[in-house]
Protein backbone atom coordinates (compact mmCIF):
# COMPACT_ATOMS: atom_id res chain seq x y z
CA UNK A 1 0.00 0.00 0.00
CA UNK A 2 1.16 3.53 -0.86
CA UNK A 3 0.64 5.07 2.57
CA UNK A 4 1.20 8.65 1.35
CA UNK A 5 -1.38 8.28 -1.43
CA UNK A 6 -3.84 6.65 0.97
CA UNK A 7 -3.43 9.46 3.50
CA UNK A 8 -3.89 12.09 0.80
CA UNK A 9 -7.11 10.41 -0.29
CA UNK A 10 -8.29 10.22 3.32
CA UNK A 11 -7.43 13.85 4.16
CA UNK A 12 -9.13 15.18 1.03
CA UNK A 13 -12.24 13.05 1.65
CA UNK A 14 -12.56 14.44 5.16
CA UNK A 15 -12.15 18.02 3.93
CA UNK A 16 -14.61 17.62 1.08
CA UNK A 17 -17.06 15.32 2.86
CA UNK A 18 -17.37 13.30 -0.33
CA UNK A 19 -15.42 10.55 -2.04
CA UNK A 20 -16.52 11.86 -5.44
CA UNK A 21 -15.28 15.40 -4.68
CA UNK A 22 -11.99 14.05 -3.31
CA UNK A 23 -11.47 12.01 -6.46
CA UNK A 24 -12.10 15.07 -8.60
CA UNK A 25 -9.62 17.17 -6.60
CA UNK A 26 -6.96 14.46 -6.65
CA UNK A 27 -7.61 13.70 -10.33
CA UNK A 28 -8.04 9.97 -9.76
CA UNK A 29 -11.09 7.74 -10.11
CA UNK A 30 -13.71 7.38 -7.40
CA UNK A 31 -12.99 3.62 -7.09
CA UNK A 32 -9.31 4.55 -6.68
CA UNK A 33 -10.10 6.79 -3.70
CA UNK A 34 -12.37 4.14 -2.22
CA UNK A 35 -9.59 1.55 -2.50
CA UNK A 36 -7.12 3.87 -0.78
CA UNK A 37 -9.59 4.41 2.07
CA UNK A 38 -10.26 0.70 2.49
CA UNK A 39 -6.54 -0.09 2.49
CA UNK A 40 -5.89 2.63 5.07
CA UNK A 41 -8.63 1.36 7.41
CA UNK A 42 -7.23 -2.18 7.13
CA UNK A 43 -3.72 -0.87 7.79
CA UNK A 44 -4.64 0.98 11.00
CA UNK A 45 -7.22 -1.59 12.09
CA UNK A 46 -9.95 0.99 12.74
CA UNK A 47 -12.98 2.49 11.04
CA UNK A 48 -11.98 5.99 9.96
CA UNK A 49 -15.05 7.27 8.13
CA UNK A 50 -18.80 7.17 8.63
CA UNK A 51 -20.64 7.11 5.33
CA UNK A 52 -24.23 8.14 4.64
CA UNK A 53 -26.13 8.77 1.44
CA UNK A 54 -25.31 12.49 1.60
CA UNK A 55 -21.98 13.01 3.37
CA UNK A 56 -18.84 11.31 4.65
CA UNK A 57 -17.64 12.22 8.17
CA UNK A 58 -14.60 11.08 10.17
CA UNK A 59 -15.00 8.87 13.22
CA UNK A 60 -13.21 9.90 16.40
CA UNK A 61 -10.23 7.79 15.30
CA UNK A 62 -10.49 9.28 11.82
CA UNK A 63 -10.49 12.84 13.18
CA UNK A 64 -7.36 12.11 15.21
CA UNK A 65 -5.62 10.70 12.14
CA UNK A 66 -6.73 13.68 10.05
CA UNK A 67 -5.38 16.18 12.59
CA UNK A 68 -2.04 14.37 12.71
CA UNK A 69 -1.72 13.77 8.96
CA UNK A 70 -2.80 17.01 7.35
CA UNK A 71 0.15 19.23 8.21
CA UNK A 72 2.60 16.34 7.85
CA UNK A 73 1.53 15.84 4.22
CA UNK A 74 1.72 19.57 3.58
CA UNK A 75 5.20 19.65 5.07
CA UNK A 76 6.29 16.87 2.71
CA UNK A 77 4.84 18.72 -0.29
CA UNK A 78 6.49 21.96 0.81
CA UNK A 79 9.86 20.23 1.24
CA UNK A 80 9.66 18.74 -2.26
CA UNK A 81 8.57 22.06 -3.76
CA UNK A 82 11.35 23.79 -1.86
CA UNK A 83 13.95 21.55 -3.50
CA UNK A 84 12.50 22.37 -6.92
CA UNK A 85 12.49 26.08 -6.13
CA UNK A 86 16.06 25.97 -4.88
CA UNK A 87 16.96 24.51 -8.27
CA UNK A 88 15.41 27.58 -9.87
CA UNK A 89 12.17 25.92 -10.98
CA UNK A 90 8.67 26.77 -9.79
CA UNK A 91 6.20 24.13 -10.88
CA UNK A 92 2.99 22.49 -9.83
CA UNK A 93 -0.71 23.26 -9.82
CA UNK A 94 -2.54 26.29 -8.40
CA UNK A 95 -6.22 26.71 -7.58
CA UNK A 96 -7.11 30.39 -7.46
CA UNK A 97 -10.42 32.08 -6.67
CA UNK A 98 -11.45 35.71 -7.10
CA UNK A 99 -14.53 37.88 -7.56
CA UNK A 100 -15.44 37.92 -11.24
CA UNK A 101 -14.83 41.67 -11.63
CA UNK A 102 -11.17 41.92 -10.62
CA UNK A 103 -10.59 38.33 -11.73
CA UNK A 104 -11.68 38.88 -15.33
CA UNK A 105 -10.24 42.36 -15.71
CA UNK A 106 -6.89 41.89 -13.95
CA UNK A 107 -6.10 38.60 -12.20
CA UNK A 108 -6.47 36.54 -15.37
CA UNK A 109 -3.69 38.53 -17.03
CA UNK A 110 -1.53 38.38 -13.90
CA UNK A 111 -1.87 34.60 -13.76
CA UNK A 112 -0.92 34.24 -17.43
CA UNK A 113 2.14 36.44 -16.88
CA UNK A 114 3.14 34.22 -13.94
CA UNK A 115 2.79 31.13 -16.13
CA UNK A 116 4.94 32.71 -18.83
CA UNK A 117 7.60 33.21 -16.19
CA UNK A 118 7.10 29.65 -14.88
CA UNK A 119 5.94 27.46 -17.79
CA UNK A 120 5.60 24.34 -15.61
CA UNK A 121 2.78 25.90 -13.56
CA UNK A 122 -0.81 24.86 -14.34
CA UNK A 123 -3.81 26.52 -12.75
CA UNK A 124 -7.53 26.51 -12.09
CA UNK A 125 -8.91 30.06 -12.06
CA UNK A 126 -12.43 30.14 -10.60
CA UNK A 127 -14.24 33.46 -10.85
CA UNK A 128 -17.56 34.15 -9.14
CA UNK A 129 -18.96 36.37 -6.45
CA UNK A 130 -19.52 33.89 -3.62
CA UNK A 131 -17.50 33.56 -0.43
CA UNK A 132 -15.50 30.35 -0.75
CA UNK A 133 -14.00 28.11 1.94
CA UNK A 134 -10.40 27.77 0.78
CA UNK A 135 -9.72 24.55 2.67
CA UNK A 136 -13.01 22.78 1.95
CA UNK A 137 -12.91 23.69 -1.74
CA UNK A 138 -9.17 23.07 -2.08
CA UNK A 139 -8.14 26.59 -3.14
CA UNK A 140 -4.52 27.63 -2.71
CA UNK A 141 -5.16 31.37 -2.75
CA UNK A 142 -8.10 33.74 -3.14
CA UNK A 143 -8.86 37.42 -3.44
CA UNK A 144 -11.58 38.35 -0.98
CA UNK A 145 -13.63 41.52 -0.61
CA UNK A 146 -13.92 42.41 3.06
CA UNK A 147 -11.63 41.17 5.82
CA UNK A 148 -11.87 37.36 6.19
CA UNK A 149 -12.80 36.20 9.69
CA UNK A 150 -11.60 32.60 9.37
CA UNK A 151 -8.75 32.18 11.84
CA UNK A 152 -7.20 29.42 9.70
CA UNK A 153 -6.34 31.88 6.95
CA UNK A 154 -3.34 34.11 6.42
CA UNK A 155 -4.42 37.40 4.86
CA UNK A 156 -2.50 40.16 3.11
CA UNK A 157 -4.28 43.45 2.64
CA UNK A 158 -4.17 44.55 -0.99
CA UNK A 159 -5.79 47.93 -0.45
CA UNK A 160 -9.11 49.68 -0.98
CA UNK A 161 -10.96 49.44 -4.26
CA UNK A 162 -12.11 52.95 -5.18
CA UNK A 163 -15.74 53.30 -6.26
CA UNK A 164 -16.45 56.37 -8.36
CA UNK A 165 -19.53 57.86 -10.03
CA UNK A 166 -19.56 57.81 -13.83
CA UNK A 167 -21.81 58.18 -16.87
CA UNK A 168 -21.44 57.93 -20.62
CA UNK A 169 -21.34 61.14 -22.68
CA UNK A 170 -24.55 60.08 -24.45
CA UNK A 171 -26.33 59.75 -21.11
CA UNK A 172 -25.17 63.20 -20.01
CA UNK A 173 -26.30 64.73 -23.31
CA UNK A 174 -29.74 63.25 -22.75
CA UNK A 175 -30.09 63.95 -19.03
CA UNK A 176 -28.12 67.16 -18.74
CA UNK A 177 -25.16 67.79 -16.41
CA UNK A 178 -25.02 66.09 -13.02
CA UNK A 179 -23.19 68.64 -10.92
CA UNK A 180 -24.97 68.46 -7.57
CA UNK A 181 -26.08 65.71 -5.21
CA UNK A 182 -29.67 66.85 -5.79
CA UNK A 183 -29.28 66.18 -9.52
CA UNK A 184 -27.76 62.79 -8.81
CA UNK A 185 -30.91 61.85 -6.91
CA UNK A 186 -33.03 62.65 -9.98
CA UNK A 187 -31.32 60.48 -12.63
CA UNK A 188 -31.71 56.72 -13.25
CA UNK A 189 -28.88 54.66 -11.75
CA UNK A 190 -27.39 51.18 -12.13
CA UNK A 191 -26.18 49.85 -8.77
CA UNK A 192 -25.05 46.79 -6.86
CA UNK A 193 -25.94 45.92 -3.29
CA UNK A 194 -22.43 47.00 -2.23
CA UNK A 195 -23.23 50.54 -3.38
CA UNK A 196 -26.21 50.96 -1.06
CA UNK A 197 -26.15 51.39 2.71
CA UNK A 198 -29.92 50.88 3.04
CA UNK A 199 -32.96 50.81 0.79
CA UNK A 200 -32.08 52.97 -2.24
CA UNK A 201 -29.64 55.03 -0.13
CA UNK A 202 -26.02 55.57 -1.10
CA UNK A 203 -23.37 57.17 1.11
CA UNK A 204 -20.93 59.52 -0.59
CA UNK A 205 -17.57 60.67 0.79
CA UNK A 206 -16.41 64.16 -0.12
CA UNK A 207 -12.82 65.26 -0.48
CA UNK A 208 -13.01 67.04 2.87
CA UNK A 209 -13.94 63.78 4.60
CA UNK A 210 -17.65 64.46 5.08
CA UNK A 211 -20.28 61.81 4.44
CA UNK A 212 -23.55 62.51 2.68
CA UNK A 213 -26.44 60.09 2.28
CA UNK A 214 -28.43 60.41 -0.93
CA UNK A 215 -31.62 58.58 -1.92
CA UNK A 216 -31.21 57.46 -5.52
CA UNK A 217 -33.44 56.07 -8.27
CA UNK A 218 -32.18 52.57 -9.17
CA UNK A 219 -33.17 51.71 -12.71
CA UNK A 220 -31.24 48.44 -12.58
CA UNK A 221 -29.79 46.42 -9.70
CA UNK A 222 -27.27 43.69 -10.38
CA UNK A 223 -24.54 41.70 -8.62
CA UNK A 224 -22.35 41.58 -11.73
CA UNK A 225 -19.68 44.24 -12.28
CA UNK A 226 -19.51 43.54 -16.02
CA UNK A 227 -23.24 44.21 -16.32
CA UNK A 228 -22.76 47.51 -14.49
CA UNK A 229 -19.93 48.52 -16.84
CA UNK A 230 -21.92 47.53 -19.93
CA UNK A 231 -25.00 49.40 -18.73
CA UNK A 232 -22.95 52.53 -18.13
CA UNK A 233 -21.23 52.31 -21.52
CA UNK A 234 -24.59 51.93 -23.28
CA UNK A 235 -25.68 55.22 -21.75
CA UNK A 236 -28.61 53.44 -20.13
CA UNK A 237 -27.96 54.88 -16.66
CA UNK A 238 -25.37 56.58 -14.49
CA UNK A 239 -23.90 54.94 -11.42
CA UNK A 240 -21.06 53.95 -9.12
CA UNK A 241 -18.44 51.53 -10.40
CA UNK A 242 -15.11 50.12 -9.30
CA UNK A 243 -12.53 52.38 -10.91
CA UNK A 244 -10.32 49.42 -11.79
CA UNK A 245 -13.10 48.15 -14.07
CA UNK A 246 -13.28 51.30 -16.21
CA UNK A 247 -9.81 52.87 -16.31
CA UNK A 248 -9.50 52.34 -20.08
CA UNK A 249 -12.99 53.68 -20.74
CA UNK A 250 -12.27 56.81 -18.68
CA UNK A 251 -8.99 57.42 -20.52
CA UNK A 252 -10.72 57.04 -23.90
CA UNK A 253 -13.60 59.31 -22.95
CA UNK A 254 -16.23 56.58 -23.28
CA UNK A 255 -17.16 57.27 -19.66
CA UNK A 256 -16.86 60.46 -17.64
CA UNK A 257 -16.70 61.00 -13.90
CA UNK A 258 -19.62 62.83 -12.40
CA UNK A 259 -19.37 64.65 -9.08
CA UNK A 260 -15.63 63.87 -9.02
CA UNK A 261 -15.30 65.47 -5.59
CA UNK A 262 -17.29 62.50 -4.21
CA UNK A 263 -16.61 58.78 -4.00
CA UNK A 264 -18.71 55.84 -2.81
CA UNK A 265 -17.62 53.73 0.18
CA UNK A 266 -14.58 51.73 -1.00
CA UNK A 267 -14.26 47.97 -0.68
CA UNK A 268 -11.23 46.49 1.09
CA UNK A 269 -9.52 43.69 -0.82
CA UNK A 270 -7.37 40.95 0.71
CA UNK A 271 -5.29 38.07 -0.56
CA UNK A 272 -5.98 34.97 1.53
CA UNK A 273 -4.42 31.53 1.73
CA UNK A 274 -4.60 28.67 4.26
CA UNK A 275 -2.71 29.33 7.47
CA UNK A 276 -0.36 26.38 7.57
CA UNK A 277 3.03 25.88 9.12
CA UNK A 278 4.61 25.13 5.74
CA UNK A 279 3.51 27.33 2.86
CA UNK A 280 3.97 25.82 -0.57
CA UNK A 281 6.72 27.58 -2.56
CA UNK A 282 4.48 27.80 -5.61
CA UNK A 283 1.85 29.62 -3.55
CA UNK A 284 4.49 31.88 -2.03
CA UNK A 285 5.91 32.68 -5.48
CA UNK A 286 2.50 33.42 -6.94
CA UNK A 287 1.30 35.56 -4.04
CA UNK A 288 4.48 37.65 -4.10
CA UNK A 289 4.13 38.10 -7.87
CA UNK A 290 0.40 38.85 -7.72
CA UNK A 291 0.67 41.36 -4.88
CA UNK A 292 3.33 43.31 -6.79
CA UNK A 293 1.23 43.33 -9.97
CA UNK A 294 -2.03 44.22 -8.23
CA UNK A 295 -0.32 47.19 -6.57
CA UNK A 296 0.13 48.72 -10.04
CA UNK A 297 -3.62 48.86 -10.75
CA UNK A 298 -5.07 52.37 -10.79
CA UNK A 299 -8.00 52.31 -8.40
CA UNK A 300 -6.65 49.76 -5.93
CA UNK A 301 -5.01 51.88 -3.28
CA UNK A 302 -4.48 52.35 0.45
CA UNK A 303 -6.89 54.47 2.44
CA UNK A 304 -7.07 57.88 0.81
CA UNK A 305 -6.66 61.03 2.84
CA UNK A 306 -8.91 63.97 2.00
CA UNK A 307 -6.04 65.72 0.24
CA UNK A 308 -5.69 62.67 -2.03
CA UNK A 309 -9.31 63.06 -3.12
CA UNK A 310 -8.67 66.71 -3.79
CA UNK A 311 -5.65 65.82 -5.93
CA UNK A 312 -7.73 63.27 -7.83
CA UNK A 313 -10.39 65.91 -8.45
CA UNK A 314 -7.80 68.38 -9.75
CA UNK A 315 -6.30 65.73 -12.05
CA UNK A 316 -9.75 64.97 -13.44
CA UNK A 317 -10.43 68.65 -14.14
CA UNK A 318 -7.08 69.08 -15.88
CA UNK A 319 -7.76 66.04 -18.08
CA UNK A 320 -11.15 67.47 -19.06
CA UNK A 321 -9.56 70.81 -19.94
CA UNK A 322 -6.83 69.06 -21.94
CA UNK A 323 -9.48 67.03 -23.78
Image: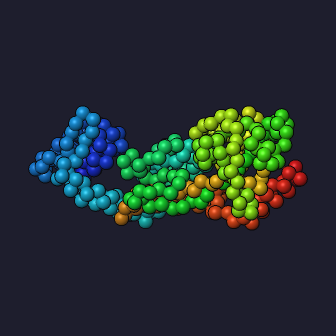
Residue 131 in view here: yes
For the point 71% across and 60% down, the residue is 210
For the point 57% across and 59% down, the residue is 158
Residue 308 in view here: no
Q: What x and y, as percent, mark residue 172?
A: 82, 39
Left or right side of 269 for 255: right
How is this picture coloured?
A: rainbow
Left or right side of 176 for 3: left
Q: Quadrant of residue 101?
A: top right
Judge by depth and name the residue closer to the eye, 60 or 271: 60
For the point 74% across and 40% down, the residue is 238
Q: What x and y, as percent, mark residue 323?
A: 87, 49
For the point 46% across and 53% down, the residue is 141
Q: What x and y, as percent, mark residue 173?
A: 85, 37
**Does residue 268 lie above or below 40 as drawn?**
below
Q: What x and y, as percent, mark residue 299?
A: 67, 55
Judge by depth and name the residue closer to the eye, 147 or 315: 147
Judge by depth and name the residue closer to the eye, 64 or 33: 64
Q: How many discs mark residues in the rendered view?
A: 0
Left or right side of 225 for 40: left
Judge by depth and name the residue closer to the eye, 276 or 79: 276
Amino acid sequence: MDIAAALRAFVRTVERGSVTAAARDLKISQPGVTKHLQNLERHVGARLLERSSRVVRPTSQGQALYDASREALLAIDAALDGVRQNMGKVEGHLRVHAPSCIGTKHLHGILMAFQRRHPSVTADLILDNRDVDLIYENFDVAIKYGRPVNQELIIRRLGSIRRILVAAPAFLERSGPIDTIERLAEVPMVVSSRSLTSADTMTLHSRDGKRTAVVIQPLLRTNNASVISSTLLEGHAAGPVQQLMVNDELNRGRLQRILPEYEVEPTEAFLAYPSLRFMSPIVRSFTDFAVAQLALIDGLVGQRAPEDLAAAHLTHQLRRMAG
